[in-house]
Amino acid sequence: MSQHPNVKLYDTTLRDGTQGEGVNFSSIDKIRIAQRLDEFGMNYIEGGWPGSNPKDVSFFERAADLEWKNAKIAAFGSTRRKNIAVEDDPQVQTLLAAKTPVITFFGKSWRLHVTEILTTTEEENQAMIRDTTRYLKENGREVIYDAEHFFDGYKDSPEHALATLMAAKEGGADWVVLCDTNGGTMPHEVAEITEVVMREIGVPVGIHTHDDTGVAVGNALASILAGATQVQGTINGYGERVGNCNLTTTIPNLQLKMDRPVVKDISQLTHLAHFVDDLANCSHNIRAPYVGATAFAHKGGMHVNAVQKVAHSFEHIEPSSVGNAQRILVSELSGQSNVLMKAEELGLDVEKGSEEALAILQNLKELEEQGYEFEAAEASFELLIRKHLKTYKSSFDLQEYYCSFRRDGKRNYDICSATVKLLVNGEEEYRVAEGDGPINALDAALRKALRPHYPQIDDMELQDYKVRIIDSHLGTASKTRVLVLSKDEKENWGTVGVSTNIIQASWRALVDSIEYYLAKHG
């Protein structure tokens, strides 16, 4: 049993992570990720900066109406502006209006920023920190003060940097978080400075690092060893410039290497990492520690021979402990256990070594070779298993579908239309519909054809639609992967389709979505 102080996990994927190039989440994505982070066991989830954009406004409105099992939702902002009463600062009021139990705000630790960026005095800067903390505490919030550029500020002037932390303490801050905002500090410096803060300030300390020198995780761990008890970071290390501290690496290092338990079921880590990648529409980092596809992959020769006899001879942990799997690249011997675990999770009985298990595994490998991924498309994966177990019967048979797009340049007129011909319960259904685009038109035509037989289809709707080009080096011959998110009143589910034809890939994902729903509620 660990005798160390508990470490709290603070996730800022939805705020700091979105500042990374190429990372973007819809409002629906943000809620879905927050719910998954909550289920995983995150202690704090930073949702964004209230009032900065419509997506963040929508997130906080929806978050206020949801029940959270493990996490506290945090709103993020800054100190009051200089030379203004905190009660009169509209930005501070938006933080309170977000109705989150936790508010995190940042202030300046580095004299350079105080004099050259804020263009104010050291005394006013400290008053801005103190007043903002006090006001938020008076309004009943847990307050986390992020000391921006703290390490650079400390190396410039220890007295000034520590005075800014004292201002937060005097205001009643619950946490002070030391931020390596430029990402240029080394682990030995982080450890030494954290020890000073622990000795001088007397408030629980957190650590927030960036990866500009490739040591963000190491810096976070060094700070924790020196006494910090909160670590801030993002899933998969998303963030500005080269990224933030990668929680996907930090969490297993804490729990499996340093005897600091932080989550109950760390076996969900790989799935969480891939889930967030899929919703961010980013390719998985196959070489990511713990969760990457090659993290426990072995290719030929002595290594393969050794791991087949004694797995830990070339593996520092049991791969399944983080939800990953050993891979033998030459013969692809592994993988059945993952299928069996997923089937069990879905409540499906698949016996190890059975014809069905082997057939599912073979089919899965073939589909993955084509470009399919199922991390955020659990519904498609469940349908795949049910088809092999013969516990699934299609709700309809496709005879044909057709899409068209017509553009009239002279009259500035365009239209998408689609027709579908299906066999439903022995009856032929032929329907035509128009839509904003080919997929919207196909969806409308498909629903028209199915509605007389399955009126409950009106209770489900498409929530989101993502497209990713898989092998872009092939140019216009590249394959397209389409991810569709659907929902009804009780749940949401993801489905996937792959093809060199974007319409066909979309059709496959769309049909899986409807088939899954009808199989559950037919």
Image (cartoon, rainbow, N blue to C red):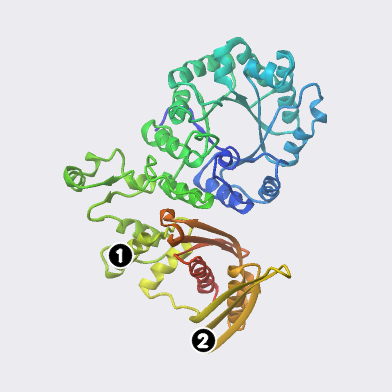
Q: Nearer the viewer, residue 385 or 140?
A: 385
The numbered disc on residue 436 is none
**Is 487 on the left-hand or right-hand side of 284?**
right
Instruction: Give the answer, above or below, for where 168 lies relative to 333.
Output: above
**Is 270 on the left-hand or right-hand side of 492?**
left
Under circle 1, the secondary element is: helix
Instruction: Give the answer, above or below, for where 298 lies relative to 333.
Output: above
The quarter holding residue 128 reads top right
The residues bearing labels 1 and 2 have C-alpha atoms spaced at a distance of: 31 Å
Q: Are marks 1 and 2 in contact (CB under 8 Å)?
A: no
**Mark 2 residue type:** Asn
Q: Residues within 10 Å of mark 2 (few under 14, many from 20)?
A: few
Residue bearing mark 1: 362
Horizontal and vertical percent for residue 446? 58, 76
View extreme (bottom): residue:
427
Q: Quadrant of the C terminus?
A: bottom right
Q: Nearer the viewer, residue 89 or 428?
A: 428
Horizontal and vertical percent for residue 495? 50, 63
Horizontal and vertical percent for residue 124? 75, 17
Instruction: Give the answer, above or below, for where 263 lies relative to 507.
Output: above
**Mark 1 residue type:** Gln
The quarter holding residue 386 reads bottom left
Residue bearing mark 2: 425
Nearer to us of marks 1 and 2 is 1
Q: Nearer the viewer, residue 181 or 35?
A: 181
Q: Quadrant of the N terminus?
A: top left
**Is 287 on the left-hand or right-hand side of 522?**
left
Residue at 43%, 63% in the rendered image? 381
Q: Earlier in the sequence, mark 1 or mark 2?
A: 1
Give the total of numbered labels.
2
Under circle 2, the secondary element is: loop
**Is 330 on the left-hand or right-hand side of 325?**
left
